[in-house]
Amino acid sequence: MIVLQNVTAIRNNLKTIFKGSGGTAPYSYAVAPNGAGGTIDPVTGVYSAPQSLSDDPSKAIDTIIVTDSTPVTPVVAQAIISILDPLGLICDIIQSELGLADDQVFLWDQKFTLPNDSRLYVAVSVVSCKPFGNKVEHVDIAGTFKEVQSTNFYAILGIDICSRSTSALYRKEEVIMAMRSDYAQSQQEVNSFKVATLPTGFVNLSNMEGPAIPYRFNISVPIQYAVSKIKGVPYFDTFDNVGITTNT
Amino acid sequence: MKFSNGKNTLLKDSPGTLPDVSLAMLNWFQKITFIRIVKTVVAHRVVETPTPVTFEGVMQPFSAKQIEMKPEGQRAWKWWKLHAQPSFIVDVDEVVTYKGQNYRVKAQNDYAEYGYLEYDLIEDYIGSGP
């Protein structure tokens, strides 16, 4: 039995669906504890991501457990979904389209030393960030008055593709193709962000590092995304008795 | 009882006798526990996991002569020399914690064929961390 999923990563506060396949229907769905904190409908398989992202990377993943209806010994299958911000979703697109392992695509500037092997590595960083929208609105959500803050950003991402072998030399173009892939388009539609189809820069930064000369290319890719935050609206519901004092 | 004296065996009569001083080094070593910061990538972010490692070795501060040979600007750093058994391997630029103090590995000299490894460490006294 396998678990079908549309995406392997999603933004916070959004929904996606999981579906069991093979085995014996109907299936029941559950989220493993100690994950990102998302919830899932046990019957329909509709997964709801948590409202906010966690600072702890180990809390950025939820494991979905699907159990079929085989009598006596039900079959169990699992799927993983990551809860990521737009930067992390770009990493997810690159990892998915280039077929890389979990430790080959990472965010830049985390004091992570590249292992001394011939594998391909991709680091994603934010070169510059320009806000072009900032607003607040007050809406009724489930009977409660809420303040919704949202901002829009235009950012230039720096994607560094590096390898000690010739992998980076021959596969650098795949990064551009990944930004235009069907998976990238589906991720943009689900998660409400936009990635430019052509980069604004493509520079060869290959240089000597100790005894090796690894291939390194820097690709600048613009993206547009929005960030929102929901909080309760403060209000007064306790008032002292009002008295009127007059001059007599 | 006949005793064999090493001086009676000429070098040309004993090829391939690279001296393995590991047993002698063990008498000089003591048990040391380092805490290595093991980095893994989870959800495209680096997760640092402190992992204690116990091995046999000895820590010595650099001598005045050794510090004098360092480039200007690095002589004020606190340099330490670690000799350890060959099973203890750390990478250059890795950070380890020993008795609550962070040290960064600046150099590794591989004398495993002789029975030990040699490392140069500096105290990370400004707390830059791993």
Image: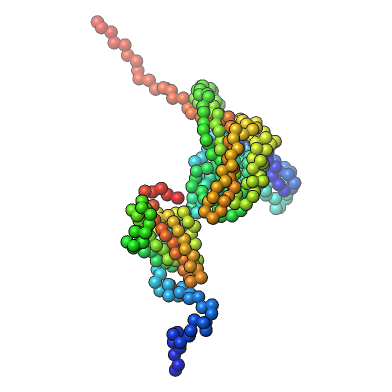
Residue drawn at x 53%, y 80% is B15
Closest to the observer, A196 or A35: A196
Residue drawn at x 39%, y 52% is B124
Query: Which of the image's four quarters has the N terminus of chain B?
Result: bottom left
Q: Is residue A61 above or below residue B89?
A: above
Extreme residue toward the front, this view:
B12
Residue drawn at x 51%, y 31% is A129
Extreme residue toward the top, this view:
A248
- Count of picture labels: 0
Q: Is residue B65 above or below residue A54?
A: below
Closest to the observer, A105 or A22: A105
Q: Position of residue A93 (x, y in %)?
A: 63, 39
Q: Position of residue A169 (x, y in %)?
A: 64, 46
Q: Is residue A21 above or below residue A146?
A: below
Q: Position of residue B24 (x, y in %)?
A: 43, 75
> Dividing the picture into quarters, in which one does residue A142 lie?
top right
Closest to the observer, A134 or A15: A134
Q: Is residue B33 above or below residue A12?
A: below
Say whether residue B66 is left or right of residue A248: right
Does any portion of residue A159 appear in the rendered image?
A: no
Extreme residue toward the left, this view:
A248
Does any portion of residue B11 appear in the rendered image?
A: yes
Q: Position of residue A228 (x, y in %)?
A: 53, 29
Colouring of the image: rainbow
